Image (cartoon, grey):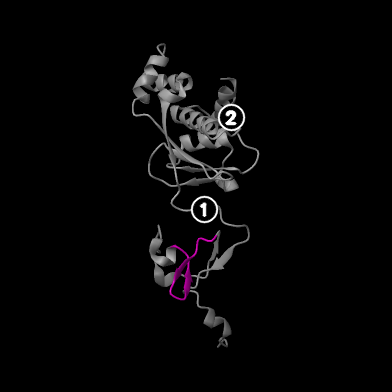
């Protein structure tokens, strides 16, 4: 309980307040550590975490595990769920946790002094047993963890836009090496294509100017 409170205080400093989803994130990360037999927060990069939404819950998980996007130990796959998969990169074991559908209602039983539902969630989530708060499943990743992590220094250049691609995220289409955007997986579109820089073409580099 002491460790939980310390981590919640750290998480609250990031947001300047504490909310129920931060508590869920911290509790989820600590529970995953116990299931995998890992001492968390980690001091290395052994644990890799995939969260299924961004926001407060993700920060709670980061604080509890020391997995961060910037350290390349945390990945966001936005399914809109307060759920996460925790992977031991040494053993290959992976466990996915999510709050039980009954957790929100059951939290009231663990915080009888709460004045409203939000406060009951905030307080109750801190005291509920793990088994009453979360469900978990042992899972297998569809992509090897080595492919997600990649290797340091791996770089490619998109044959269409000329932008650099890191971490082996390039896509091969025939003889072309493309970034995901140029391969048709873009999340954006250029507003004024004619005003943008022309597409990259390595042949131009060998042609005389003027």
Element under disc 1: helix
Label count reads: 2
Q: Residue at x 41, y 46 (%)?
A: 78
Looking at the image, which is closer to me, 170 or 19?
170
Q: Which numbered circle lies on residue 112?
A: none
Extreme-top residue of the structure: 113
Residue 205 vs 34, above or below: the answer is below
Which picture quadrant has residue 83? top left
How crowded pointer 1 is (Cα within 10 Å; few <14, some 14-19, many 20+) is rated as some
Please indicate, yes or no, whether residue 189 appears anywhere in the rendered image.
no
Extreme-right residue of the structure: 43
Q: Is 177 a magenta residue?
A: yes
Which of labels 2 and 1 is toward the front? Answer: 1
How crowded pointer 2 is (Cα within 10 Å; few <14, some 14-19, many 20+) is rated as some
Q: Position of residue 34 (x, y in %)?
A: 54, 30
The stretch in magenta equals 168-180
Q: Which numbered circle lies on residue 148?
A: 1
Residue 6 vs 38, above or below: the answer is above
Q: Position of residue 8 (x, y in %)?
A: 55, 26
Q: Is 136 a magenta residue?
A: no
Which picture quadrant has residue 42? top right
Q: Residue at x 43, y 51 (%)?
A: 142
Q: Position of residue 157 (x, y in %)?
A: 54, 69
Looking at the image, which is closer to me, 20 or 102?
102
Q: Residue at x 38, y 41 (%)?
A: 80
Looking at the image, which is closer to me, 33 or 64?
33
Q: Earlier in the sequence, mark 2 or mark 1?
A: 2
Q: Which numbered circle lies on residue 10?
A: 2
Q: Is residue 121 left or right of residue 38?
A: left
């Amino acid at each position: 309980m002491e460790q939980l409170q310390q981590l919640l205080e750290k998480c609250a400093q990031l947001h300047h307040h504490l909310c129920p989803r931060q508590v869920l994130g911290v509790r989820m990360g600590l529970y995953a550590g116990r299931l995998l037999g890992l001492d968390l927060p980690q001091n290395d990069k052994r644990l890799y975490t995939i969260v299924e939404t961004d926001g407060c819950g993700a920060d709670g998980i980061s604080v509890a595990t020391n997995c961060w996007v910037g350290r390349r130990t945390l990945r966001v796959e936005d399914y809109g769920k307060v759920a996460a998969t925790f992977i031991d990169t040494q053993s290959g074991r992976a466990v996915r946790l999510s709050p039980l559908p009954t957790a929100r209602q059951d939290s009231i039983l663990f915080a009888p002094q709460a004045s409203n539902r939000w406060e009951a969630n905030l307080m109750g989530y801190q005291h509920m047993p793990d088994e009453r708060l979360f469900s978990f499943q042992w899972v297998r990743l569809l992509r090897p963890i080595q492919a997600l992590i990649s290797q340091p220094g791996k770089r490619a250049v998109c044959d269409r836009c000329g932008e650099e691609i890191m971490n082996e995220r390039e896509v091969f289409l025939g003889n072309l090496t493309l970034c995901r955007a140029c391969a048709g997986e873009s999340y954006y579109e250029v507003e004024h294509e004619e005003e943008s820089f022309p597409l990259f073409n390595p042949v131009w580099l060998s042609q005389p100017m003027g």
